[in-house]
Structure formats: structure tokens, C-alpha cells
Amino acid sequence: MAGSDRFEVPQDMRAFAERSVEQGQAETARKGARHVAEKAVTFAERNVASSFEFAQRLVRAKDLQEMMRLQTEFIRNQMQVLSEQAKELGESATAAAKDAANPGR
């Protein structure tokens, strides 16, 4: 008798609920991907601006020694910036993937 008291969710309702969850996951994934892409574009713009600034300083260098110093500083700085950007993009991509997997969190 206890077995016959069980409530069954109609198949149409179950299918609707599954589609809603799938659509939510897809929308969450799109938002996450858009956020990561926007961040990557922002980083690229910053890197290009930094390269132009470096080129301007390099052109104004007084001698070869100053050019070498500027280049060393630029490369050191860019390596640090690129490392930080890669870390931030990785964290953003991981967060986006987690959000897409669990959109209701």
C-alpha cells in the first residue's frame, strides 16, 4: 500500500524541468565565456598600450645603455603582468565552468 502512495511527476513536467535546467546552464556558460573573453580583450589592450609606451621611451633613449635598461625593465614587467593575467584568466575560466555546472548556486 505504501508503494501505491508514491507521487509520479508527469513526463511532460519532467522534460520541461530538464530543458529549463539545460537552458540555465547554457546561459550561465555563455555569460561566463563572455566575461572571460572581455577580460582577455582588456588585458590585450593594456599590453598593446604598454608596448607603445615602451617604444616611445626607447626612441627617446640617450644611448645604448639606457636602451638596454629600458628593455630589461620592460621585459621583467611584462613577464610579471602576463603571469598575473594568466592566473586571473585561469581563475575566471574555472569560476565560469563551476557556475555553468551549478547555475543554481
Image (cartoon, helix red, strand yellow):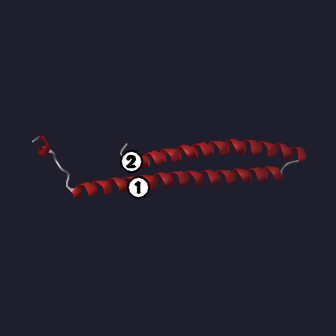
Q: Residue at x 37, y 53 (%)?
A: 24
Q: Tell me if 98 is positioned left or right of 10 in this view.
A: right
**Disc with the residue nearer the chain's start (2 vs 1):** 1
Q: Tell me if 29 is positioned left or right of 55 in this view.
A: left
Q: Tell me if 59 is positioned left or right of 88 in this view.
A: right
Q: Furthest-bottom residue in view?
A: 12
Q: Residue at x 54, y 54 (%)?
A: 38
Q: Residue at x 56, y 45 (%)?
A: 90
* SS assignment at label 1: helix
**Residue nearest the viewer, comparing 33 with 72:** 33
Q: Identify the amino acid type marked 2.
A: Pro
Crowd around label 1: few <14 · some 14–19 · many ≥20 (10 Å): some
* 19 is higher (above) or lower (below) than 91: below
| Quarter of the C terminus within the rendering | top left
* SS assignment at label 2: loop
Q: Quadrant of residue 12?
A: bottom left
Relative image position of residue 69 (x, y in whole percent) = 83, 42
Q: CA distance from mark 2 to mark 1?
A: 9 Å
- Residue beneath label 2, please? 103
Q: Furthest-left residue in view?
A: 1
Relative image position of residue 100 (x, y in whole percent) = 43, 49
| Quarter of the N terminus within the rendering | top left
Relative image position of residue 20 (x, y in whole percent) = 32, 55
Label drawn at residue 74: none
Verify CB contact (< 8 Å) between mark 2 and mark 1: yes
Label drawn at residue 27: 1
Q: Residue at x 18, y 50 (%)?
A: 8
Q: Identify the amino acid type marked 1.
A: Glu
